[in-house]
Amino acid sequence: MAEVLTEDIACEELQKIFDRNSAPLIIFGTGTSCAVDETFGMQALRCHLENKIGMYKLDSVQKQQWTRVIEDLNNGTDFEKAMNNVVEERLCKIVIRETASLLINKEKDIAFKLLTGRIKWPAIGFFKYLLSKRINDALHVVTTNYDCLAEYAFTFADIPYITGYSYGICGKLDWNRAYESMASYEKLSSGKKTYKRRLHSRHICLYKIHGSLNSFKTENDIIEINSLMYMNELPKEVERFMVTPGTAKYEKLLTGKSALLERFSNQRDRHSFFLFIGFGLNDSHIMNSDMKSKLMVKGCPAVILTKCINHNIKEYMESCENLWTVYSADNGSGTNIYNCKYDNILRLECNYWEADKFCKKFLGG
């Protein structure tokens, strides 16, 4: 008979996961941005696209593809699966344009508030704790988000971070140069000789594998340039490097595959502990066969912090003995904690599914 999960057991087991393992690979999704404003969520994007795409003058192929999207959505198909119908190039660009437009209008309103601490990004305390306690130099973080809310929060918290771009007024995608920007040198002496030892400051490596509001494609490069990020009308020489929902995103990824997906794959393979924050496990190239093997076959420890659970999360919850799921008990009020080795769901009053509250409760951070 399975053991009953109590608060004391949950505290002890969750503390052990973080104490006995090296720093986790962190994957955060739209849930972290929705905690700031619901506009950044997939439901808001779905509504925006449904309202806007039909206003464009579409040719017959584009109309047919978008009609299939709407039909699938009306029949209850998942948003990302429905967007698989969008493959025509111009229609893809329209989707990217409207996705950016939705996010731009909201992010412009709150960016400075994040930068000055008047609005708090929900996981910033947890990131500061992990960065100070758990690593030697780099904390590796993956996100599917397009927005730059995390970057504003990191800047306010004085957390160094790199996104793979060399620094300057226009950064080019070059992870080696970006990593070197975190280097410092310590002068040492041995007898009469002096030499320098290279060190790297503690920082975050942020892998924005779906692109970002401030990343763009030119004819030859992928660049990061903040002066363009909130512009609706871009210079003709550039286009946004954003990978929208649907299979067409894989074509967009080809240009940056070695720098984006392969970097993520390398970190996934190197890590044996995973932390998911506000991420629904829906993205198929993150939750691919290799990640499934890590969690289901190899039994790597993992923690999910999320407001809501879905079908994909439930599948992993029931299949992975080393997975702990911490989620909202009643649409935002209270917390459920589940691990399939126990025959019950633990209910706690406080919202410990929120990253910073989880950190304080279970890690003392």
Image: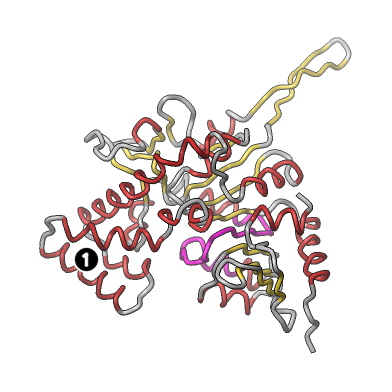
Name the residue type under label 1.
Trp
Q: Residue at x 57, y 34 (%)?
A: 155
Which element type, helix, strand or loop, lies under badge 1?
A: helix
Mark 1 burial class by Cα count in 10 Å: few <14, some 14-19, many 20+: many
Horizontal and vertical percent position of residue 303: 66, 63
Quarter where residue 12 is shown: bottom right
In the displayed orientation, state which residue is furthest to the bottom. Answer: 1
Q: Which residue is mark 1?
A: 66
Observer-nearest of 39 and 316:
39
Magenta segment includes 269: yes
Q: Is 163 situated left or right of 51 in this image?
A: right
Q: Residue at x 80, y 56 (%)?
A: 19
- Which residues make up the magenta segment? 268-293
Quadrant (top left, top right, bottom left, bottom right) of the N terminus = bottom right
Observer-nearest of 117 and 177:
117
Q: Residue at x 74, y 19 (%)?
A: 196
Horizontal and vertical percent position of residue 265: 54, 54
In the displayed orientation, state which residue is furthest to the top. Answer: 192
Magenta segment includes 202: no
Horizontal and vertical percent position of residue 326: 65, 67
Q: Is 273 situated left or right of 154 in this image?
A: right
Q: Is 150 situated left or right of 77 in this image?
A: right
Give the answer, above or below, for where 310 lies relative to 171. below
How many tags in the picture?
Answer: 1
Q: Residue at x 59, y 50 (%)?
A: 122
Horizontal and vertical percent position of residue 260: 47, 48
